[in-house]
Structure formats: C-alpha cells, structure tokens
Amino acid sequence: MSAPTLDVARRAPAGRTAPPQTSASAAALAGTGYLLRFMLRRNWVRLTVWTGALVLFCGYYVVAISAVYVTAADRQNRAAAMTNAGGTLLAGPGYGLENYTIGAMFTNEMALWLIALLATMNILQIARNTRAEEASGRSELVRALPVGRHAASVAAFLVVVIADVAFVVFGSALLIGPGQLAPADTFTLMTGVGLTALVFAGITTVTSQLTVHSRAASGLAFAVLAAAVLIRGIGDIQERHGSWLSWFSPIAWTQQTRAYVDVRLWPLAVSLVAIVVALAAGAALASRRDHGGALLQGRIGRADAAPSLAGPFALVFRQQRGTLLWWLVGCVAMFGPAGLFLGADSGSAIKDIAGQNSLTAEIFGSDPIAAFLAIMMLHNALAVAVFTTAAVLRVKPEEDEGRLGLSLSRALSRTSSLLAHLAVAGIGALVLLLLGGALPLWVGTLLSGSDTSLLVLLTSGGAFALGIGVLIAFTAVLYAWLPKATPLAWVLCGLVIVERFFGSVLDMPTVIKALSPFYWVGNYPKDPIDPVNLIGLGAATAVLLALAVTGFRRRDINAG
C-alpha cells in the first residue's frame, strides 16, 4: 500500500470529527460533580445534625441572654468578668466591653466556640471523604473510572462549603429575627465564622497529603486549631484589642471584624486568601505523591510485632494513643486557662453576676465559686463523653474493613477483643477527666491566687467517670446487638448535652432528664454527691457491659 493510501486510512471516517482535546486542569477535576452528589448523599445526616445544632444554639443563646441580662447594668457586670487574662483567653479581644450590648456579648463569648465547633466538623468531613477513603482502598476503585486526581479533594471541600453556607444563612436568620441583632453586623460575623472554619478545612486538605491515616491527618489539623486558639489568646492578652501576634491566628481574623461595635470587612479578605493558599498547597502536594501514599513516610517497623503488642489491649491502645494525646492537649489548653479566671477580682464579679436575677441565682446558688468549678468540670465531662463515644465506635470500622475478623482468627476470644476497646475508652476518659480537666483547672486556680482543693476537683471527675461509663457501655450494647444502629449513641450523647445545658430552661420532664447519666451525677461541688446515684450508675454500667459481651459473642462478625 502506497504512502498516500496509508495516510487516507489513518484519517477519521467521513462525517465524524475528532474528539475535543481535554485540558490538564479539566482532566484533574473530571467527575467532581458525581463525587459531590455521592458525598452529600452519604453525609447528609451528619451535616444536618452538625449545622442544625449550631444554628439552633446560636438562636437559643441570644434569646436566653437577652432574657437573663435585661438591663445595661446587668451586662456591664458580666463584662467586668471578661477583662482579666482568663476572660480574654477564653473569649476574645474585648471589643464593646465599655458598652456591652447583646451583640457584643455574643461576639466576645460565642465566636471562638462557634469557630472551633464548625472547624471541627470541617476537619472531620475532609479527612473522612479524602484520606480515609484512600486508606480503605475505595478511592482507588473510584479512580479506575474517569475521575480526576483532584476531584475527591475538591468535592470534599465543596461539601463543607455547602454546610458552612447553610450555617451562615440560617444562623444569621435566627440572630436577626428572634435575636433582633443588627443585620449587617450579624451577617459579617457569621460569614467570618464560616470563612475561618473553611481555612481549617483547607489546612486539613494539606495534612491529608502528609500522612497515610485519616486519624493522623485530622490530628495534625486539630493541633493547628489548638495552636490558633492559644496564639490568639496570648496575643490578645499582650495588648488590649489584640497585638501583632493575634493576627497569626485565623480565629483573630473573624474577631477583628468588630461586629456590633465598629464593623469592618477587610479582615475577611485575609481568610479568603488563606483558603486559596491552603487549597493550592494541598493540590501541589497531592500532585507530588502516589495515590494511597503520603509525603511524610513513617519509619520502618520491626519484622515481627513487639511482645508488648501481643495482647488486644496494647494493639487498640497503640491505634488510639495519638487521638488521646491530642484530646489531652486540647483539654489542658482549655481548662488550665479557665482556672486563671478565678482571680481575686473575678470572684467578686461572679458573685455580682449570680445576684443579678432569679435565673443566675439558681445557676450559681449560694457559692458562686463552687458553681463555676462545677460548670467547668461539666464542660470537661461533656468533651470526654464525645471522645469516649467516638473511641468505642472505632471498633465498627475495624470490623467492616476486615481487621477485626483477622485478629479473631488467632487464639483470641471475642470477649477479650471487645473489652480491650472498652478499656482503652474508659482509661482515656479517666486521663482526660483527671489530667486534662481537674489538674489543669486546679493549677490555674493556684496561679490566679484562688484557694481551691484538688481533691474536690478529682472527686468531681470521678463522679462524671461513672456517668461516662454508662455512655461507653450503652454504645457497646448498640454495637454488639445492632451494629447499624450505632449512630443512636450520638443521640444519647446529644441528650446529655441538651439536658445539662437547657433542661431547666426548657422545663424538660423528669422522665426525659433521667435518661441522661449526667442527670444522676448532679452538680458537684455546687451540690453534694448522692452516693446512691453513683452506685446506680455503676450497676447500670455493669449490666450494660454484660449485655454487650453477650450480644457480641452471639452475632456473626463481618469478615470484610
């Protein structure tokens, strides 16, 4: 065949055109829309619960403080408690303290917590939808389809963007409507909260390229979040309304909008730039690593397992020790500074607040200092309840991905395997309650010059440990008998939070309150401990544990 004939044979058939060339950037994002719809369908319950709870809390908080702090004098008494180092560290730079309106109160006392909670949701979602999918091998199957390298990361980020936008829109609507706050200031503040949370979503995109496991990726992101909290706090303590150090923290970029005082928009641009930089860095790093790999390579392990890992407890502890360490760091960073709040001037300020009206008098009682310590230990216990619930539920993916079945193929009983996971969660709870809550709080009170007994705080932590034991055992029962119903463990955890924070305000029926283990713990050291209640909590834990072991030994195990 002649050359011209060969040339004609290579041409496309008549009437057909060559397919359009796809650019490299478009190919890298191919399939993003499909993955976005899949992730939304997969995570819509989690996203709804997170954003819905935060939105409702915003509306409730503003309505509640408006009812409690009716007069300007009441609000100025509260502002007086925010002027010391502890108040600045736990709140913000203190704009508007001279004329403490409801809006200024919301900004100073809630912006930090909203950012931390929304950022937590974003961090967990990004790690779950990117790094965890790679570790499980599912994303490799997806990449076998026409899906680009960066499609999963972009889709995961768009998921949290949608959730954060919903929080900003609906949260602003509640604050502007029932809360009666200024629309422009409200939308500026809530937009700042959402943008700062997206900064940490971008940071998680970067950390997901560094480590192999999702726990390590989210742990690094949480470390950055904790550092941001501390840097902002230390910077604001150094200078009124914030120093140059404060600006190294993304949290300060929202607080520096000065909402409800002298609103300004340009700090929001800093968050936008940081988001773009983080996403660009994440994309660049993702292009430099193999799929399923990581840029930070772990050290080469031993050829055989160390003798210390022969038992199930040691293995489970090794899996969860990093998470426990970061939770401990976070608790110490949070509750140590809380003890600084109890300086000589803050004691009188708390007493002034307690005497403002009937509601605050009921909350603080006759001993406002003891009531403050009870509130701080309650916050610590609620954080530990979240940790332990998540720690127990770690056994479910171990089963779903086949690792639990492999471990049970050895000379290992099901009882020992389940109790190992529960023991790690229980010991972690004690560590966080005593070393992460009671001890740092006591040290903080010593530094502030307050006379507080360490034994009182340790007793409070021990009482809450029994309540958390019920949560651990209840979660184990769900996993042992009804694995698909394990999300109900978070429902009980949420009931505990609602009952403790809003039970009296919402006038919840006693029968509903009694479902919360913390209801039986009480408010020590404000109120004395009832030994009968603690014995009942211990008995309930034992019964639930026996029920969990029985169910786990009877049902089939997913082999992966």
Image (spheres, rainbow, N blue to C red):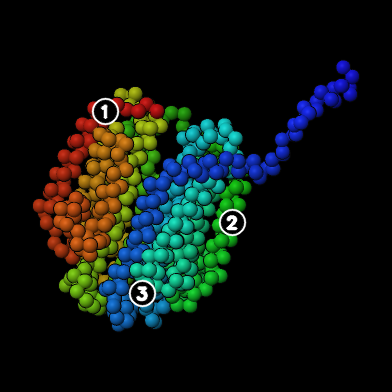
Decide: marks 1, 3 in contact (CB < 8 A)? no
Between marks 1 and 3 in the image, the one whose residue lies nearer the viewer: 3
Choose top left, top right, bottom left or bottom right for residue 426: top left
Decide: marks 1, 2 in contact (CB < 8 A)? no
- Determine whether the residue tagged by mark 1 lies in a helix, strand or loop: loop
Cα separation, mark 1 vs mark 2, equals 49 Å
Three-letter amino acid code at the position of disc 2: Val
Residue plotted at (21% across, 52% down): 516
Three-letter amino acid code at the position of disc 3: Ile
Between residues 84 and 4, which one lies in front from this camera angle? Answer: 4
- Determine whether the residue tagged by mark 3 lies in a helix, strand or loop: helix
Three-letter amino acid code at the position of disc 1: Arg
Q: Which residue is mark 3?
A: 102
Q: Is residue 234 above or below residue 318?
A: below
Answer with mark 1 or mark 2, whichever residue precedes in sequence.
2
Decide: marks 2, 3 in contact (CB < 8 A)? no
Answer with mark 1 or mark 3, whichever residue precedes in sequence.
3
Residue plotted at (18% across, 70% down): 362
- Looking at the image, the residue that sits furthest to the top is 1
Choose top left, top right, bottom left or bottom right for residue 86: bottom left
Left of 558 or right of it: where is 528?
Answer: left
Between residues 161 and 419, which one lies in front from this camera angle? Answer: 161
Cα separation, mark 2 vs mark 3, equals 34 Å
The numbered mark at residue 276 is 2
Residue 487 visible in the current orientation: yes
Residue plotted at (32% across, 43% down): 487
Which x, y percent locates residue 479? 28, 37
Choose top left, top right, bottom left or bottom right for residue 9: top right
Residue plotted at (29% across, 44% down): 488
Q: Which residue is mark 1?
A: 555
